[in-house]
């Protein structure tokens, strides 16, 4: 036996379903049950990163990455080679923001000179001096200890302090 539903009932169910879904969206819920994609983290340079990156890349492609300062520098250089309109005076602030907001954690008291060099985007000899200083003076307790190494730019160390793990 074939059932025939009154057209008014079908329309009412469709309208009710549409209203529920619409209200859920207004309240911030998505029908898939997944949270909305993350936005760029707060921090100095966020507006610059949004302006320069968001038109070409999905936000999650950037925010889910955790790279060293050296790696972010390489990535931005590659984007420029591929045609990204990044001015010279935007390069350093962009790399700084990306490496701070989406940096790679490093266990500074165990890290090799290569890992330290990549973390701070510094020359190999200066990274080796940091390791030697650590070996001679003992483990670093905070970022200011690293900034005491002769030749180190304290601003670069302070910039990356959130990416440093001093161990327990």
Image (tube, helix red, strand yellow):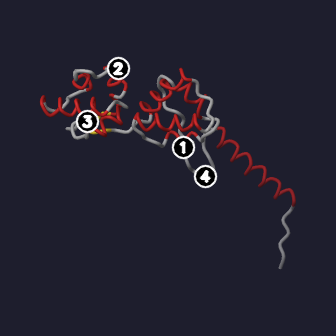
Q: Is residue 47 above or below residue 65?
A: above
Say which label, 1 or 3, has the lower sequence index: 1
Q: Would residue 154 appear left or right of 90 to someone viewing this image?
A: left
Give the Cα distance between marks 4 and 2. 44 Å
Read off the residue under disc 4: 32
Read off the residue under disc 2: 155
Indicate the secondary structure of the residue bearing disc 3. Answer: loop
Give the Cα distance between marks 1 and 3. 27 Å
Say which label, 4 or 2, has the lower sequence index: 4
Instruction: Identify the residue at horizontal 49%, vertical 31% (top origin).
Output: 41
Give the Cα distance between marks 2 and 1. 28 Å
Which image quarter: residue 134? top left
Q: Quadrant of the C terminus?
A: top left
Q: Can you tell which mark lies on residue 108?
A: 3
Say which label, 4 or 3, has the lower sequence index: 4
The answer to whether mark 4 and mark 2 are in CB contact below 8 A is no
Q: Nearer the viewer, mark 2 or mark 1?
A: 2
Give the Cα distance between marks 4 and 1. 20 Å
Q: Would residue 52 appear left or right of 63 to someone viewing this image?
A: right
Q: Is residue 136 above or below residue 111?
A: above
Say which label, 4 or 1, has the lower sequence index: 4
Say which label, 3 or 2, has the lower sequence index: 3
Q: Can you tell which mark lies on residue 61?
A: 1
x%, y% of residue 50?
Answer: 58, 30
């Amino acid at each position: 036996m074939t059932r025939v539903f009154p057209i008014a009932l079908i329309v009412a169910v469709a309208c009710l379903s549409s209203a529920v879904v619409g209200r859920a969206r207004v309240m911030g819920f998505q029908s898939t049950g997944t949270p909305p994609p993350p936005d760029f983290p707060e921090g100095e340079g966020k507006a610059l990163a949004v302006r320069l990156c968001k038109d070409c890349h999905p936000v999650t492609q950037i925010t889910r990455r955790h790279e060293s300062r050296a790696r972010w520098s390489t990535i931005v250089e590659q984007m420029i080679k591929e045609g990204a309109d990044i001015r010279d005076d935007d390069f350093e602030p962009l790399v700084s923001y990306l490496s701070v907001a989406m940096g790679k954690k490093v266990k500074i008291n165990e890290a090799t000179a290569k890992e330290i060099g990549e973390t701070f985007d510094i020359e190999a000899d200066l990274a080796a001096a940091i390791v030697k200083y650590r070996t001679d003076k003992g483990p670093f307790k905070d970022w200011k200890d690293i900034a005491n190494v002769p030749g180190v730019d304290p601003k670069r160390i302070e910039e990356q302090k959130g990416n440093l793990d001093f161990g327990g």
